[in-house]
Image (cartoon, rainbow, N blue to C red):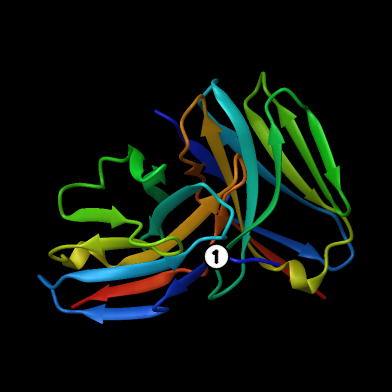
Amino acid sequence: GEDVEQSLFLSVREGDSSVINCTYTDSSSTYLYWYKQEPGAGLQLLTYIFSNMDMKQDQRLTVLLNKKDKHLSLRIADTQTGDSAIYFCAEKAGTASKLTFGTGTRLQVTL
Amino acid sequence: EPEVTQTPSHQVTQMGQEVILRCVPISNHLYFYWYRQILGQKVEFLVSFYNNEISEKSEIFDDQFSVERPDGSNFTLKIRSTKLEDSAMYFCASSPDNEQFFGPGTRLTVL
């Protein structure tokens, strides 16, 4: 079955770049997503990438996809304190409609 | 910007009672979903709904669960006889195609 893994915690200084990593197992993944969850809030869709792409950039966010290694990353440039949150990677496999989520990475931004 | 809304934000119930969690998806979306997140665990898919019927469901979504779209705007999740292990955050999502937009969640506490 599908499995999505992430490291649990990342701490960066304000102004630095953050890189959050994710690995997945399902080779039939079609779309891969990044969601942000702030305390007490729902899941906010940040960006997503189709599996035939290897990079997508959207303002401060850059998504890199390595299909061979089944590795996805989210880079946040010029990280701000408002970026402190839990970041979830998720995949959609084949023709399924469901998303399979990773464990989430807690990003802490320090001054 | 249109958002998915959910009510109530917090529901407390006694074990064995029935609960109905309500969601208002984004108005022009066609696909609807329920997910749950037990404290400290991954976000798990429960069910997807399209064209007035269930399109996919997980092993978690057993006979005690049901979904309904009673009118043109609401999408509900009913849990018939709640168990302690049903305590979780329940998220509704809606989608026009490949992007899933989540509501803020309902925290269900079963005592």
Whether residue B42 appears in this view of the structure is no
> For this rendering, which residue is in front, B8 or A80?
B8
Which of the 4 image quadrants contains residue B80? bottom left
User: Residue at horizontal 25%, vertical 40%?
Assistant: B59
Q: Position of residue A105 (x, y in %)?
A: 60, 55
Relative to A94, residue A7 above or below? below
Whether residue A63 appears in this view of the structure is yes
What is the chain identity of the residue bearing mark 1? B
User: Residue at horizontal 36%, vertical 57%?
Assistant: B69
- Reading the image, the residue beneath label 1 is B4
- Considering every residue shown, the one lying at the far left of the view is B16
Which of the 4 image quadrants contains residue B15? bottom left
> For this rendering, which residue is in front, A47 or A84?
A47
The image shows a total of numbered marks equal to: 1
In terms of secondary structure, where does tag 1 sit?
loop
Q: Quadrant of the C terminus of chain B?
A: bottom left
Q: Amino acid at mark 1?
A: Val
Relative to B8, residue B75 above or below? above
Q: Position of residue B1 (x, y in %)?
A: 71, 67
Which of the 4 image quadrants contains residue A68? top right
> For this rendering, which residue is in front, B68 or B42?
B68
Q: Position of residue B88 (x, y in %)?
A: 34, 66
Q: Is residue B64 left or right of residue A7?
A: left
User: Residue at horizontal 49%, vertical 42%?
Assistant: A99
Q: Position of residue B44 (x, y in %)?
A: 40, 49
Q: Is residue B39 left or right of residue A16?
A: left
Relative to A10, residue A48 above or below? above
